[in-house]
Amino acid sequence: MYRRGGFSVLVKRTAKYEVPGRDGPTVLGVPTPKTLFRRGLLHSSVVAYILVQKFSLGAPHYRLEQHIEDQGVELDRSTMCRYVEEAGGSLGATVCHAMWQEALSSAAVISTDATSAMIQPEKSKDGLRQACKKGHFFTAVADCDHVLFAYTEKHTQEFVKKLFGGFTGFLQCDASNVYDVLERGPPKDTDDGVTLVGCWAHCRRYFFEAAINKYPVGIQGLMRIRAIYAADDAFRSLPPVKRKEMRAQHLRPLMESFFQWVKDARASAQGRNLATKALGYASNQEKELLRVLDDARLPLDNTRSERTLRKVVVGRKNWMFYGSDAHAESAAAIFSIIASCRLHAIDPHQYLDEILRLLPYWPRDRHLELAPKYWAATRAKLDPDELDAPLCSFTVPAS
């Protein structure tokens, strides 16, 4: 097991009793507490330590193996991989699944983005290893409630439709056409559905690329977008109703002036270069970019989802590939749990240690109560002596 400061050995003693009977005495043992890892040699605290070190701090298993060995403990990387995959699969099928369901059913704004990652495929029929393939991690930041990740083999409209199907709020994303199926799919009998919202940071990025290459259009576009951000920042702390009024009064004229300038500049621009690319992006995304005026809860960009992807990018540099599609799916669940813990100022190591011990006892229809958003309220209902004990049975409180 692991406690702050180092590793130790947890000794489990099982009481046994000799019960007399007609045919002679019978030896009975006390029922052992349920564990998520059957016949596991690692305590949940060690599993939590491995998960935090890898998916929060970006330490690959081979470095962890060396670091743990320096502390006098032998724990090979293959054992770590098995525990990580099993822990991630369990968390993904229970807590993360409940978090996704709540986000799609009740969230007002979801910011999403995606990045690629290398996946090691299975060995060929002749036993040879094949070249790594490319997979994709999607992230979804649902209001201020959950930070979620999902893995897919292909970056397609079918997966996006499956991932965000049933969501009826605002989906803030970049201009990738994989999201178009959510808004421009088959005709519906009602007006309910996903409303796509553009990202001003992506728009600004194209003008920045034009500006550093000495195109005057890029510099002027950056100055206009800077004025939009400055105006919005002035009343960011206002209540939503008042903020919407201020946006209509101060932000709308700036945005309309920006798109009128884009229209005029595009009409006189010639050739295919970074300047025309920036103008074309802004013109094509005009409707989506103006939607931030419809609801005061909408930020100007979805950079919060891009920031959450940094953990995936750090991992992509440190361990280069994931061992399989199943391992990547488990990693997505662990990324979701740790990022949501950070969002709600919860210690991810303590949370994972307690959740992995509590999960075998928890009812299947109440997994949402274990999400980081609700963990403080749920933990207050649990017996503190049971939480402090490294190995025990848990009493599930009433809902």
Image (tube, rainbow, N blue to C red):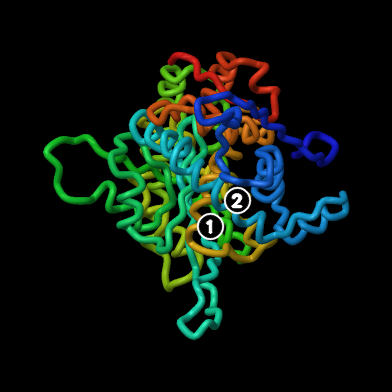
Residue 239 falls left or right of residue 157: right
| Residue 157 position by quadrant | bottom left
Q: Which residue appears at 49% of the width and 53% of the height?
A: 329
Q: Which mark is residue 327?
A: 1
Residue 118 percent location from the top left of the image: 55, 66
Cβ atoms under marks 1 and 2 closer than 8 Å: yes
Q: CA distance from mark 1 to mark 2?
A: 8 Å
Question: Which quarter of the figure is the N terminus placed in?
Answer: top right
Residue furthest to the bottom in view is 126
Question: Which quarter of the figure is the C terminus placed in?
Answer: top left
Q: Nearer the viewer, residue 242 or 211?
A: 242
At mark 2, the secondary structure is helix
Q: Residues within 10 Å of mark 1 (few under 14, many from 20)?
A: many
Residue furthest to the left in view is 189
Residue 281 percent location from the top left of the image: 41, 57
- For residue 120, above or below residue 32: below
Q: Which residue appears at 66% of the width and 56% of the height?
A: 79
Q: Which residue appears at 64% of the width and 26% of the height?
A: 17
- Asked if residue 243 shows in the view, the reply is yes
Residue 326 percent location from the top left of the image: 48, 58
Q: Which residue is mark 2?
A: 84
Query: Which badge, 1 or 2, comes first in the chain's sequence?
Result: 2
Residue 150 percent location from the top left of the image: 46, 49
| Residue 323 position by quadrant | bottom right
- For residue 192, above or below residue 176: above
At mark 1, the secondary structure is helix
Q: Which residue appears at 42% of the width and 70% of the height?
A: 270
Q: Nearer the viewer, residue 18 or 324?
A: 18
Q: Nearer the viewer, residue 4 or 260?
A: 4
- Asked if residue 301 shows in the view, the reply is no
Q: Residues within 10 Å of mark 2 (few under 14, many from 20)?
A: many
> Which amino acid, by three-letter code, is at mark 1?
His
